[in-house]
Amino acid sequence: MKKGILICLSMLLGSCGDGKTIEINSDQFSDHFPAMWFNPSTGETAAVTTLDKPPEAGYEILIEPRNAEIRMRACGIDGPCGFTEIGLGDQYFQQASFEDVAPPVQSRLKWTANKTVFYIKGKTEQSRGLMMILDMNKRDEEVSFRWKSLTNID
């Protein structure tokens, strides 16, 4: 019974299940840069007003639809941060355990085939998650992906 309650609570908190669909388009950009900051802890986005500094703590990923690129801010002494490709398709996004996932090997990614799933490791334990690319249109500067937090899942 306790395990079932924990699973339901985790789903309500967004740490498992289908995750959250994030859609980014040019209407969301600031007047300064055609890009968005992404917070891998909360799944929130914010317009880029300066490339040097995110709007607040937790915004660790820069998404540039025009360049078909995402990149993780440097982690410094906190260990490896970045992305690890773990597979192609929904089954990888639905995985509940990632004990065998290799440490992040890339801090910058070019968007790849739709449904490619990446493990995200940011600066903190709260910024672990998954990202599955759904669609990317460079010309219209649109990106959509599914995201879910992996905090407290292992």
Image: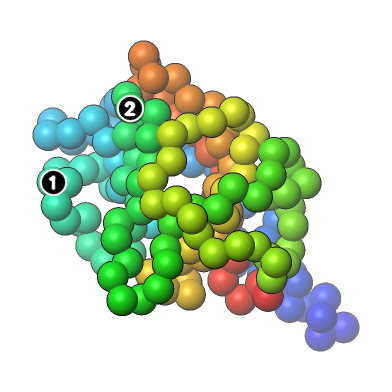
Label 2, residues with CA under 10 Å away: few <14, some 14-19, many ≥20: some
Identity, as a three-letter code, of the amino acid under mark 1:
Thr
> What residue is shown at x 36% (from left), y 76% (from top)?
78
Residue 92 x, y percent position in the rendering: 72, 49
> What is the secondary structure assignment of the residue under circle 1?
loop
> What residue is shown at x 43% (from left), y 41% (from top)?
109
> In terms of image quadrants, where is residue 54?
bottom left
> What residue is shown at x 48% (from left), y 41% (from top)?
22
Residue 152 marker: none
- The residue nearer to you, when weighing 110 against 122, is 110
Q: In which quarter of the image is the C terminus?
A: bottom right
Q: Residue furthest bottom?
A: 2
Instruction: Answer yes or no: is residue 149 visible.
Output: no
Asked if 108 appears above or below 133 in the picture, the reply is: below
Asked if 68 appears above or below 120 in the picture, the reply is: above
Asked if 22 appears above or below 147 in the picture, the reply is: above
Image-based side of 15 in relation to 37, left or right: right
Identity, as a three-letter code, of the amino acid under mark 2:
Asn
> What is the secondary structure assignment of the residue under circle 2?
helix
Residue under numbered circle 2: 67
Mark 1 or mark 2, earlier in chain: 1
The image shows a total of numbered marks equal to: 2
Residue under numbered circle 1: 50
Which of discs 1 and 2 lies nearer the camera? The answer is: 2
